[in-house]
Amino acid sequence: MKIKAEFHKVFGREADIVATAPGRVNLIGEHIDYSDGFVLPFAIKYETTVAIGRNGLNIFRFSSAQRPEEVIELNALTPLQGETWGRYVAGVIWALGISEGLDIYVDGQVPVGAGLSSSAALECSTAVGLNQLFGLGKSLKDLARITQKAENEFVGVPCGIMDQSVSLMGHQGSALLLDCRDLSTRDIPFDIASHGLELLIIDTQVHHELVDGGYAERRASCEKAVADLGITSLRDISVADYEARKSELDPTTYIRGYHAVTEMKRVLDTVDALQAGNLARVGELLNESHRSLSEDYTVSCPELDLAVEVANLNGALGARMVGGGFGGSAIALARVEDIAAIQSAIVVRMSDAGFPMPRFFTSLPSDGARVIG
Ligand code: GLA
């Protein structure tokens, strides 16, 4: 196995275990995982693989195929040590409570900075490998909570539970209906190929400064809506009841909470439409989700809005931004024969607008994390 040979080259010893975990796209259900919502992501074919070995020393050493020139060496696991990718790995070791010295070699094939959860792939491959190596017996749900804790408390990013859950629990051929309240799941078959369709992933290659602060601020607004309405979560109020109580909230809190309650309904409507084989309806729901994220929740940006608009003008059934927003990727559901035209139209319009050149990917739903060697 190539990664074992690379591990040996860097650390001069044998790896004990090799594990892999995918990135994700989210079909629908954006910015509601932290409000106990249902979300519908799927694992993609791009994966991060880690080789792990005990080193018998009191240090942690990390190396990666993508940055061959550096070996990160840590004597202790202390939160928030600089802007390195090693924080994600160290955070997982910390959150699992492991203190034995380790060598870890990473080969990350999930595009970085594209909003496709390369960080969750790194966390989850590490977690699954360590769980097996140390015989910890943690369930996938446990590992989802542990990797989220690593990212929240060690890395310092206030993310929800969606990315880690789907990287761990996704299955080939299906989107994962995840209840973010108790992490129960249902596989929803997503066989768009049999409808002659493909899901195009459009990476705008932009990353606006708002990303971190903007995310935390939206999260805080949802928590404020819950507190002001005296409810347990935005999951527990219908769209009609929420609308009826508009006067109890300030305008910004109201409209942000409105995104959340309507998005929760759109996820369940999407599941119904998929089960009925009504892909045109799925497309409409994607468009409604994008409008809500862009206008109500205000987490989109001109580059994402343009990608979505041009995809729709060129025959997509629907399109929307995915992930945290303020950059990253959009998805477009389109007929296979329209994909090339959509891509070229997006390239032309993005370039006319002076935006960076987008990158394109596509993926069917793939399997979640597993030990492979
Ligand atoms: C990021 C976070 C997730 C989720 C999405 C928005 O990807 O990591 O937890 O909140 O944004 O849906």
Image: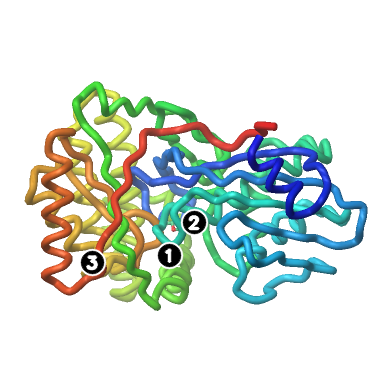
Residue 222 disc label: 1
Q: The C terminus lies in which quarter of the figure?
A: top right
Q: Classify mark 3: residues with Cα within 10 Å, few (<14), some (14-19) or many (20+).
A: many
Please give the residue where the numbered disc 2 appears in the rendered image.
34
Whether residue 153 sits left or right of residue 339 in the image: it is right
Q: Is residue 117 above or below residue 85?
A: above
Q: Quadrant of residue 254?
A: bottom left
Which residue lies at the image location 83% right of the left edge and 40% below the top edge?
134
Q: Residue at x 51, y 41 (%)?
A: 166
User: Three-letter amino acid code at disc 2?
Assistant: Tyr
User: Whole-percent x and y of residue 246?
Assistant: 28, 66
Disc 1 on helix, strand or loop? Answer: helix
**Callout 1 crowding tier (Cα within 10 Å): few <14, some 14–19, many ≥20:** many
The mark found on residue 303 in the picture is: 3
**Residue in front for this viewpoint, 30 or 239:** 30
Q: Are marks 2 and 1 in contact (CB under 8 Å)?
A: yes
- Residue 115 position by quadrant: bottom left
Residue 224 in view, yes or no = no
